[in-house]
């Protein structure tokens, strides 16, 4: 992880007893890599009026698992990563659609049900290259997650004999994907269904993605991309 998460230049506040710092970094590698020669600047629609140009990876014959959710009004696609993981994309049918309903539906049980319904197809696929980073204080979020006892009456007797409390929690994370992949051919187990019409799946507007462990079904990361430029 060296060099992936920047060192903090901030000084620890004087009133802090214990500062808990969490750091995570993930760089996904596709099972089937993208041809970097097909990556080009393309339009990404922030909304109905604003458009930006971003590097978009392309695969005109991508093998993916696909489904349409009429309740959430979105198209779903799943791409496999190395290491028994996959990314599931949720792309609204309209650029103006609010993503909140999709976000609130993303439980492990819901994703499990979705996974069973997806069908393997061949599609024209475009995905923006992505590099996410986050740094911020998450103290309030942890307190809202019913972890208030960590701040009020924690047991730190194995650390120190002094009566101290957890005062502040910070989290830093990084997440990125690019053309890198393990091979140039799709997984042998993926046999696409024959469609009577060509299918396009272009992530050229705000979307949500989920990083999922395919062995356990655990949701490892949920991201919402409103603008893929240098997030």
Image (cartoon, rainbow, N blue to C red):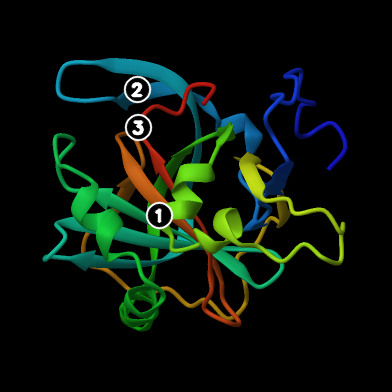
The answer to whether mark 1 and mark 3 are in CB contact below 8 A is: no
In the rendered structure, are the residues bearing label 2 and label 1 in contact, judged by CB atoms less than 8 Å apart? no
| Relative depth, front residue between 63 and 173 | 173
Q: Which residue is mark 3?
A: 226
Give the number of the mark in front: 2 or 1: 1
Q: Earlier in the sequence, mark 3 or mark 2?
A: 2
For label 1, count other residues whose C-alpha is less than 10 Å away and answer few (under 14), some (14-19) or many (20+): few
119 or 223: nearer the viewer = 223
Q: Is residue 198 visible?
A: no
Circle 1: element type: helix
Q: How crowded is the residue under tag 2: few (<14 C-alpha within 10 Å), some, or many (20+)?
A: some
Quadrant, the N terminus = top right
Disc 1: which residue: 144
What is the x, y in percent for residue 84?
Answer: 66, 73
Of labels 1 and 3, earlier in sequence is 1
Alpha carbons under labels 1 and 3: distance apart: 25 Å
Whole-Å distance between the Cαs marked 3 and 2? Answer: 13 Å
Q: Is residue 60 left or right of residue 51?
A: right
- 73 relative to 59 in the view: left or right: left
Q: For the point 14% across and 34% down, which residue is it?
A: 96
Q: Nearer the viewer, mark 3 or mark 2?
A: 3
Q: Which residue is mark 2?
A: 43
């Amino acid at each position: 992880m060296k060099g992936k998460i920047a060192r903090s230049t901030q000084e620890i506040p004087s009133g802090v007893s214990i500062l808990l710092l969490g750091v995570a970094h993930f760089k996904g590698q596709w099972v089937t890599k993208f041809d970097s020669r097909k990556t080009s600047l393309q339009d990404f629609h922030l909304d109905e009026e604003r458009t930006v140009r971003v590097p978009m990876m392309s695969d005109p014959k991508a093998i993916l698992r696909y489904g349409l959710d009429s309740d959430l009004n979105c198209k779903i696609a799943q791409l496999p990563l190395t290491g028994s993981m996959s990314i599931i994309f949720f792309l609204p049918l309209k650029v103006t659609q609010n993503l909140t309903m999709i976000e609130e539906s993303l439980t492990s049980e819901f994703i499990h049900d979705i996974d069973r319904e997806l069908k393997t197809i061949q599609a024209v696929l475009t995905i923006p290259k992505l590099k996410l980073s986050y740094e911020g204080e998450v103290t309030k979020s942890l307190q809202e997650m019913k972890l208030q006892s960590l701040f009020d009456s924690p047991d730190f007797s194995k650390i120190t004999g002094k009566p101290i409390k957890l005062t502040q929690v910070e989290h830093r994370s990084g997440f990125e994907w690019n053309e890198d992949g393990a091979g140039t051919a799709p997984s042998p187990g993926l046999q696409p269904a024959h469609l009577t019409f060509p299918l396009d799946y272009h992530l050229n507007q705000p979307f949500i993605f989920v990083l999922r462990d395919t062995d356990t079904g655990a949701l490892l990361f949920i991201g919402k991309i409103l603008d893929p430029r240098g997030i």
